[in-house]
């Protein structure tokens, strides 16, 4: 089975590629730039440059590759960037998805779309798959619009929503764990929200959940996140404690005292019962995720 991954140079893409190769899948990793993945020696691995906002380029790649499965993880995932450049956010997150779906339909690929907790408004929290989206920022809106396109796809599809992904970055930019570590090691203060509630997701668990969806050809919407309910402030304090760094440098802020271009939903944790039942999804605790993200510390 041949799996095409968009955004493969990114955080999730790196782990997902590795897990699929270990399982014996043929993986075609794609990204706009050069390959940053360390799998070139694996004969099941191939990398192609593809800008999925270029409709003709997408069409040509699909004609050549003919993927059985597409995992669309590429996106602009920074809410503030989306808020400040809505036209570009539309082009990448929504129109890019449209182009990929059109090309996938020509070869009847199983299409898996990676979405976000930010499609919800965060008023209630602990969301189920069937809950209605109502984003409070433009990033969430672009992803919700893309979800609507996926739901219209004529062949098998799955939507994977996830929450605040963390772990050990292998390429590219860091995540909340590494930001906290870098700031505190330099003796710098770090401001982090204590009025937002999440169920943070260990990246290796997320990748494993997607692999299970591919193996079982599980269709529909799945919530894949961690099981611990934490604020980003609590996460930062746990990182400091685990690494023996000063929690005193972590400054507690709220949406009322620390403004950003894009609003964030207040409470967006997930109920993951469906994934546990149908996929055998079994995420680690946040403490275990910390140990794996910082081995030997």
Image (cartoon, grey):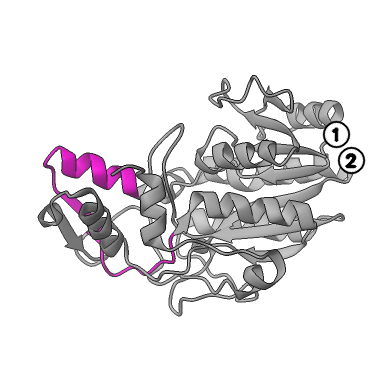
Residue 259 shows in the view? no
Q: Are marks 2 and 1 in contact (CB under 8 Å)?
A: yes
Instruction: Determine whether the residue tagged by mark 1 lies in a helix, strand or loop.
Output: loop
Query: Which residue has dot 1 on it?
Result: 66
| In-front residue for pair 156/1 | 1
The residue carrying mark 2 is: 107
Which quarter of the rendered picture does the C terminus lie within? Answer: top left
Q: Is residue 250 visible?
A: yes
Instruction: Give how far across and how far down residue 222 sits, in percent.
Output: 65, 65
Measured along the vertical axis of the image, is residue 57 above or below residue 208?
above
Category of crowding for the residue at label 1, using alpha-carbon neighbours closer than 10 angstroms: few (below 14), some (14–19), many (at least 20) = some
Q: Is residue 119 magenta?
A: no
Q: Position of residue 131 (x, y in %)?
A: 60, 76
**Image position of 233 (left or right of 245):** right
Asked if residue 259 is positioned above or below residue 123 in the image, the reply reads above
Q: Looking at the image, which residue is at 74% across and 43% down?
A: 70
- Picture coordinates of residue 226, whole percent (x, y): 48, 64
Residue numbers of the magenta segment: 177-200
The answer to whether residue 46 is above or below residue 6 is above
Q: Is residue 40 left or right of residue 188?
A: right
C-alpha span from label 2 to label 1: 6 Å
Looking at the image, the residue that sits furthest to the front is 296
Residue 205 occupies quadrant: bottom right
Measured as percent of width and height from the top left, residue 223 is found at 59, 65
Q: Determine whether 228 is above or below 123 in the image.
A: above
């Amino acid at each position: 089975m041949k799996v095409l991954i968009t955004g493969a140079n990114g955080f999730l893409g790196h782990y997902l590629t590795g897990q699929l190769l270990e399982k014996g899948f043929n993986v075609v990793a794609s990204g706009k730039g050069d390959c940053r993945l360390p799998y070139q020696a694996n004969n099941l691995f191939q990398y192609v440059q593809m800008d999925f906002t270029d409709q003709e380029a997408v069409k040509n790649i699909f004609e050549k590759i003919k993927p059985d499965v597409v995992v669309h993880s590429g996106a602009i995932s920074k809410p503030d960037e989306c808020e400040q450049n809505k036209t570009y956010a539309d082009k990448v997150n929504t129109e890019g998805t449209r182009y990929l779906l059109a090309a996938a339909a020509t070869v009847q690929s199983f299409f898996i779309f990676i979405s976000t907790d930010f499609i919800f408004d965060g008023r209630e929290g602990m969301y189920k798959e069937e809950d209605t989206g109502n984003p409070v920022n433009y990033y969430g809106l672009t992803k919700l619009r893309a979800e609507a396109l996926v739901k219209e796809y004529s062949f098998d599809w799955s939507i994977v929503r996830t929450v605040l992904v963390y772990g050990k970055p292998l390429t590219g930019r860091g995540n909340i764990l590494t930001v906290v570590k870098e700031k505190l090691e330099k003796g710098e203060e770090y401001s982090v929200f204590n009025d937002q509630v999440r169920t943070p997701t260990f990246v290796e668990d997320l990748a494993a959940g997607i692999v299970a969806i591919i193996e079982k050809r599980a269709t529909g919407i799945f919530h894949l996140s961690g099981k611990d309910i934490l604020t980003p402030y609590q996460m930062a304090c746990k990182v400091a404690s685990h690494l023996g760094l000063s929690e005193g440098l972590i400054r507690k802020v709220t949406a009322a005292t620390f403004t950003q271009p894009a609003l964030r939903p207040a409470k967006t944790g997930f109920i993951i019962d469906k994934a546990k039942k149908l996929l055998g999804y079994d995420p680690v605790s946040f403490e275990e995720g910390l140990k794996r993200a910082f081995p030997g510390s």
